[in-house]
Image: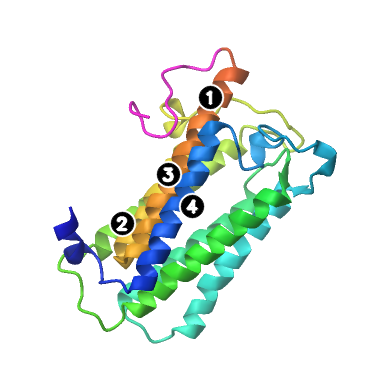
Amino acid sequence: MLPMLPRLFFPPPFFIKAMSVICVVSLGNVGLSEIRGKHMQYSKFLNIGEKKPIEKKIQVSSRTGMLIAYTPAFLAGAASFVLFPNEDLRFLLVKSTLTFHFFKRILEVLFVHRYSGGMEVESLIPITLSYFTSSVFVIYAQHLAQGLPEPAIDLMYPGLLLFLIGISGNFYHHCLLSKLRSKDDKEYKVPKGGLFDLVICPHYLFEILGFLGISLIAQTLYAFSFFVGTTLYLMGRSYVTRRWYLSQFKDFPKDVKALIPSAF
């Protein structure tokens, strides 16, 4: 595997190597914490696995929290068009896909998702910082790669195709989730339709595919590390989500997996 890396990635400077390791380790640790019962405090896991008294927690509504989480990353992507206006096609696609991903998420928060709970500020801060810093370093790593020899294996167009599949599948399953509830309905239901009949978190699966697509477009070590770290976190989150549905719904089908059909 190691001899293949120079053929797949632009050669990274030491700083980008270090930040890539930090990205994978930190996001992977959060995913492992989910499995161990220490959850990021939002959605159905709000107030679950926390020892701090509820009255001492600072919370915002889920819609407000998610808007705060996604907006800085979107602004970082939008700013990159001004800061780096005359880069090559690969850089343009990296900026465009990354910015569009977070723009889509903001639109979904405003017009698609139906929320029922809150979000703890103590979880909101690291989520926001993670999205923002990762976006900044994906863009910065691409900027540093300008002028370097192209990787021997060009994955830009397969990456773009994967991104389009990922973002489309993610949006489709978010729409299915929103249709589970009426406007004033706060109760959770078992999702149906699409890949929900095979896995409980197909929207996570397609989000992973989207980030894989961005990493293949970029072909930088940091973009790939962000994809790996995101995958590890969403694996942990999907695992405990499936466990939550099994505990809450007696008729939840046990053959429905967490993230990967028939496998995980």
- Residue position marked by numbered label 2 in the rendering: 161
Q: Is residue 257 magenta?
A: yes
Q: Residue at x 44, y 26 (%)?
A: 197
Q: Are marks 1 and 2 in contact (CB under 8 Å)?
A: no
Helix, strand or loop at label 1? It is helix
**Left of 67 or right of it: where is 169?**
left
Q: Check disc 2 and give the amino acid type.
A: Leu
Foreground disc of the pair 1, 2: 1
Magenta highlight: main SS: loop
What range is drawn magenta here?
Answer: 251-264
**Image position of 71 with respect to 165: above or below:** below
Q: Foreground: 234 or 22?
A: 22
Find the distance from the CA under tag 4 to the CA under tag 2: 28 Å
**Image position of 108 with respect to 139: above or below:** above
- Residue position marked by numbered label 3 in the rendering: 232
Find the distance from the CA under tag 1 to the CA under tag 2: 32 Å
Foreground disc of the pair 3, 2: 3
Of marks 4 and 2, which one's residue comes earlier in the chain?
4
- Residue position marked by numbered label 1 in the rendering: 243
**Left of 73 or right of it: where is 208?**
left
Helix, strand or loop at label 3? It is helix
Find the distance from the CA under tag 3 to the CA under tag 2: 22 Å
Q: Position of residue 38 (x, y in %)?
A: 60, 37
